[in-house]
Amino acid sequence: MTASQPVQSVLRRRRLLAGGSVAMIGLRLIIVYLFALLLQLTFFSQVRVAGVAPELPALVAILAGLFAGPRRGSVIAFCAGLMWDVYLSTPLGLAAASFVIVAYTLGGITEDLFHDTRLQTLLLVFVGTAAMVTVYALLGEVVGQRGLIDDRLPRVVLIASGWNALLSLVAAPAVRWAVGSGPARSRTRRHEPPASPLKVR
């Protein structure tokens, strides 16, 4: 056996473990998203506030952007939006595009600021949902889907964002588990302040 063979064996095992980890994350995400989609299409088709339901597919996309980062989160958001597009009467890809734009932007802006606290998650989900619903309506108008922007839009944005913010208290642990983040995960690199050279250890 040559010296390079043990190294190649170790690398091969690492690749297999990484592949298994990615597959497991994908499976967990599918489970979480399908459950959210089922709730959206069944329970929340009846339970509404002033005629407005939560946007659970958007909630999963926003949380993915926060927990998985802008790159991985935008991929998850695109898949979530594309699956949601199937059930919408608007052109295919409209939800996917709006989900990607907001998830990537929100994930990028908060990448070094997100500390995964309940209050911060709640506020970011509220802002993200408001942005996502607004971007969806604007993109719809651009592609000729009339009727998405009217005097009801502010009410829909406000209520849907409030719904999602409250539901994020339950959904955040599920998405955090799905993307493989620890319970206290923060993408912020918390650097310890340098020790004083005079400090005695």
Image (spheres, grey):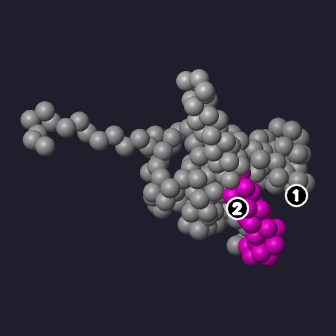
Residue 118 place in picture, x, y as percent: 48, 62
Q: Does residue 186 appear to the left or right of 190 in the view shown?
A: right
Residue 72 place in picture, x, y as percent: 64, 41
Please tell me whether residue 149 is drawn above or below residue 165 in the rendered image: above
Residue 30 is a magenta residue? yes
Disc sitting over residue 32 in the figure? 2
The residue that appears at 9% across and 35% down in the rendered structure is 198
Q: CA distance from mark 2 to mark 1?
A: 18 Å
Picture quadrant of residue 152: bottom right
Camera-nearest residue between 57 and 14: 14
Q: Secondary structure at mark 2?
A: helix
* Mark 1 Cα-neighbour bin, 10 Å: few <14, some 14–19, many ≥20: few
Picture quadrant of residue 170: bottom right
Bounds of the magenta span?
26-48
Q: Does residue 77 appear to the left or right of 197 in the view shown?
A: right
Under mark 2, the amino acid is: Val
Residue 138 place in picture, x, y as percent: 76, 43
Quarter of the image where the N terminus is located = top right
Q: Does residue 159 appear to the left or right of 188 in the view shown?
A: right
Camera-nearest residue between 4 and 147: 4
Q: Which residue is mark 1?
A: 87
Camera-nearest residue between 21 and 190: 21
Q: Does residue 38 appear to the left or right of 59 in the view shown?
A: right
Q: Main secondary structure of the magenta part?
A: helix
Please tell me whether residue 126 is drawn above or below residue 54 in the rendered image: above
- Using the rendered image of the protein, determine whether residue 129 is visible from the camera's viewpoint: no
